[in-house]
Amino acid sequence: MAGKVLIVDDEPNIVVSLQFLMKKSGFETSVARDGDEALLEVERFRPDLVLLDVMMPHRDGYEVCQQLRSSGWADLKIVLLTAKGREAEVTKGLALGADAYVTKPFSTADLIDTVNRLLAGGG
Amino acid sequence: MGSLRGGGRWVFAATVAAYVVLGGVVLSLLLWSGLASDQRKVMSDAIAGQAPALLITSVLMVAGLVALVAWVIGRYSSTARRLTADTRLVLDANPSHQLDRSGPPELRELAMAVDDLAERRRMAEGEVAEQIAAAQERLEQERNRLATLMAELAVAVIVCNVDGQILLYNAAARSVLDDEAVVGLGRSIFGIVDRDLLAHAVERIKDGSSSHVTTTLHGQQLLQVQVATLQGADQAVTGFVLLLEDLTDRINLSTRRDELLRELTEGTRASLGSIQAAIETVVDYPDMEPEERQQFVGIVREESHRLGRQVEQWVTESTAYLGTEWLGSEIGGADLLAVVAGALQRADAVTVSVLPPTEALWVRVDSHAVARAIGHLAERLHEQVGVDSLTLAIARAGGHAQLEAAWAGEGPDAEEFQTWLDEQITGGAAPSVREVIERHGGEVWSGNASGAAPHLRLLLPLTEAGLEPAARIAIGDTGRPEFYDFGLFDQPAESLAWQDRSLGELSYTVFDTETTGLDPTGGDEIISVGAVRVVNGRLLRRESFERLVDPQRRVPAGSTAVHGITAEMLKGQPTIDTVLPAFARYAADTVLVGHNVGFDMQFLRLKEPSTGVRFTQPVLDTLLLDAAVHPDHEEHSLEAIAARLGVEVLGRHTALGDALVTGEVFLRLVTLLQQRGIRTLGGAVEASRATLHARLDQSMYNR
């Protein structure tokens, strides 16, 4: 299944793995290192799905998510990826328009499943 | 004129008449001696001719004189006596009695003067009485205010007098000390805090401050007790205020947290150690066999998974613990909305409407801080986006309560919204909205997801219903509890023997039992005990005792028809071996009262050997007391007495229902006994005994 995935994270060590995994799963990838860059990259790269870290300098993942939703990116799939694992944060993330919320550490197989499911049109 | 009563008055009148007669005789003699002899001749002839008539006239005149004088004297003196009696009446019995105004004018004036004096005295007394009434009213109001305040306090408070008798406690104290045999008006504080320990705490109090001691209750509950003294006018200690805090949970909590922390560090180190060793081995020995390498990689994978699971577990558990540690108060969803709406309306920036919650939910929050946080955001929304009206709602959202404020129109700029969160909330040294929300372990955001109206949402911690109902503060519940009795301040120490103590000052346990039948020696058993306390002349409905008892035998259908208790209801209930000791502790140091109590006592006494409990206190029977007070009535059933004494009968034929009715009846009987001069327990026992004998003689002593 082909598709474009944008990886947004300020932690290079996890970006390496994520990019490798997404490429191996057959996706075209691009990387952004903070929230502002992510907004620009979405406009340029026009991905089908964003792997979005919540904890980032300047503009956090919640804000990016909200911004994307309010600027017309309704069909773009957003997966929030974060070390913030409290239930209140999950609720907030989903309320702000994310399609899935994955807590670090995560199983790579589960993440790939989630991405595939979302891009296949699952909820 | 005090000596002129009865005969004295006549003697006096006769004396006056005698003087008049003597005067007449002397005058006649003087006239006689001044006459010439021929004149004397004419005179004596004239007199001699009229002698009987003259004599009779003289006697009549003298008698008339005596009567007149006696009458005049009598009139004055009897009026004076009546005045005296009337004045005494005014003085001693009826201050508004008016003096009789008949009698001689001088005495009438005196009567009027006395009336004036009485009138002034009446007015003065009326003023004093009014002042006393007003002062008492104020005192009562202050006491009620204090009691209401205490009842609402989340802190457990107990006030006792110097003898250790509990005068006041609040709902929080009741919930901390969950034992009706320990907390109760008139009960001894030394059942909670050891006498020596309290003395030790009092010794350490300096300059009107307070001191702490820690104690255990029933060997399991750890209590921290803060003690302050109450001082009377002369600086003498009149009582103590105790603030109680249950440390048990907190200690358990911190113990568990320490354990978690230890597990985390140790578990993390172990897993990290394995990972590090495996990776370094792989790196240092690049020429190892593929199977060997596979083994090391497997270790890294396994250990990192284990680390992840460990962190996950730690997060779950620690949030559960952190959630309970923070001391907000629990509040109902609808009440929280009301608090927030009230604060917004007072701030007057926006108009507010509230959607009532569709489900009952409780949150644990600092409602004031939350209201101010929302108020701050509402103010910014008003200034920056022109929001004029907000609609508040609250609902469950996963494990949280989601409080929403929605409006029509534009939403705020996301970046600007973030800056509002970090501003200090206006007014005072307040934290920011973000700090308030973080303190609650919550979240806050603004949005208009899926085309909905723009809104502001807060996630706040939910508490499970039924978790700690006693500690909940329900706003609007103003029912003043029976939690205080300052009359106990003035109660003398319990030094008198039982029989000499006054009926009004004694504490009573009024109780009733339901049984499987009427024959305790034939195997019938108690299936329910209900009791209520009477302290200082008040029935303490809130301090009741009610237990169902598994009789460990069949419950006859006939008895179920009476008390409505089925075998099903008794399944899993404690047996009499547990209930009787609990009841004994509840009834300790009180007089037992019941209706036809001999029946109940028979059941209790039969259980004394097997339970090791002994009921040695005095016992009063309302049936016998009623017979003593109303010897002419033949009907002394509880219903009949209740009807006669105007006691409303509700929920009869449960043990507690009957105990409550008996308690009300008992209080009225005590008043009637007192009116008949029976004021002590000894007197009441004696009167009961006498009626019992009378009734036995008439063979009327039936249940």
Image: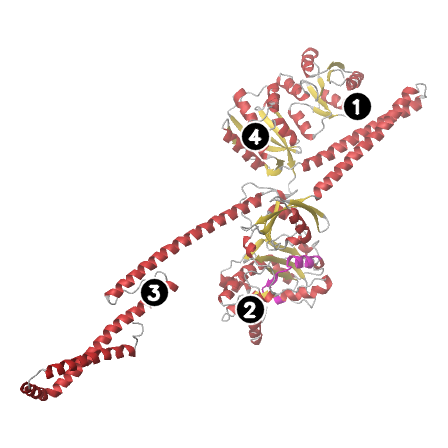
Of the 4 image quadrants, the one containing the C terminus of chain B is bottom right
Foreground mark, 1 or 4? 4
Front residue of B213 and B518: B213
Quick check: do tags 1 and 4 share a chain? no
B609 versus A8 height, above or below: below
Mark 4 element type = helix
Q: What residue sits right under mark 1 in the picture?
A: A108
The answer to whether residue B579 is magenta is yes
Which of label 2 and label 3 is nearer to you?
Answer: 3
Q: Are marks 3 and 4 on the same chain?
A: yes
Q: Which residues are magenta?
A: B578-598
Q: Which residue is mark 4?
A: B372
Q: Answer yes or no: are tags 2 and 3 on the same subunit.
A: yes
Amino acid, disc 1: Thr
Q: Residues within 10 Å of mark 2 (few under 14, many from 20)?
A: some
For badge 2, the amino acid type reads: Gly
Circle 1 — which element? helix
Percent of width and height locating residue B236: 57, 51
Residue B354 in sight here: no
Q: CA distance from mark 1 to mark 4?
A: 44 Å
Foreground: disc 1 or disc 3: 3
Residue named by callout 2: B683
